[in-house]
Amino acid sequence: DPCAIFGTMSVDSLCLTSWRARPVSFVSLMTLYESNFIRLRALVGDARRLAGCSVSSVAGDLDLHVEALEHSPYTTILRLTYFFESAGEAAVADPDLEVRVYHDARLAEASRCARWVRHPGLAELKAGLPNALGERWLRNMLLNKWLDYCTERGHRLAAATSAPSVTHGRS
């Protein structure tokens, strides 16, 4: 088990193709999904075991909310978000990501992100990318970085579970 040897956060460095090599290509996007799966598993454990809403609270950070929206034999759909509250106003979910976990392929895809183009920098970046592939790339880079951030802050939603072994040479 690579996790036992290297630690959970190092395992995604064993992904065969670096998503950093050629951004916004199909191959690099699939590798990014693999990295997302590894990082998500470190944070929540086996997504198939999640039910309803779970909250991770750590000092110095907002509560991380994870909601299991749907389970099927091969996939789980989760919603990950922070809620920002302002006096007298409704709480705002941001980022508000829907993540589809493919258990058999060991991939996690940010399939939806509400309101993510409201920041001028992201809107400008999005405008310069190929439409569908570029949007997937941005959503999943956001998920990847946010999962890393949440883990570094100390968020954990499940007892440690063994992470999946890394399979090289998948077709």
Image (cartoon, rainbow, N blue to C red):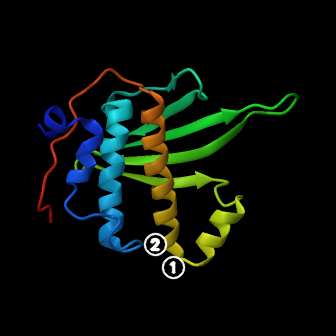
The residue pinned by badge 2 equals 133
The residue pinned by badge 1 equals 130
Q: Badge 1: few (under 14), some or many (20 or more) residues near its Cα, within 10 Å?
A: few
Q: Nearer the viewer, residue 133 or 152?
A: 152
Query: Is 142 left or right of 123, judged from the image as shown?
Result: left
Q: Disc 1 residue type? A: Pro
Camera sees residue 105: no
- Tell me the quadrant of the picture where the C terminus can be found: bottom left
Q: Badge 2: few (under 14), some or many (20 or more) residues near its Cα, within 10 Å?
A: few
The answer to which quarter of the image holds residue 158 is top left
Q: Which residue is at a point 58% across and 78% down the rendered structure image?
A: 128
- Secondary structure under tag 2 reads helix
Q: Which residue is at a point 67% across and 54% down the rendered structure image?
A: 115
Instruction: Name the residue at the right extreme.
Output: 88
Image location of residue 118, percent across then percent down: 71, 58
Q: Is 42 drawn above or below residue 22 in the view shown?
A: above
CA separation, marks 1 and 2? Answer: 6 Å
Image location of residue 40, percent across then percent down: 37, 40
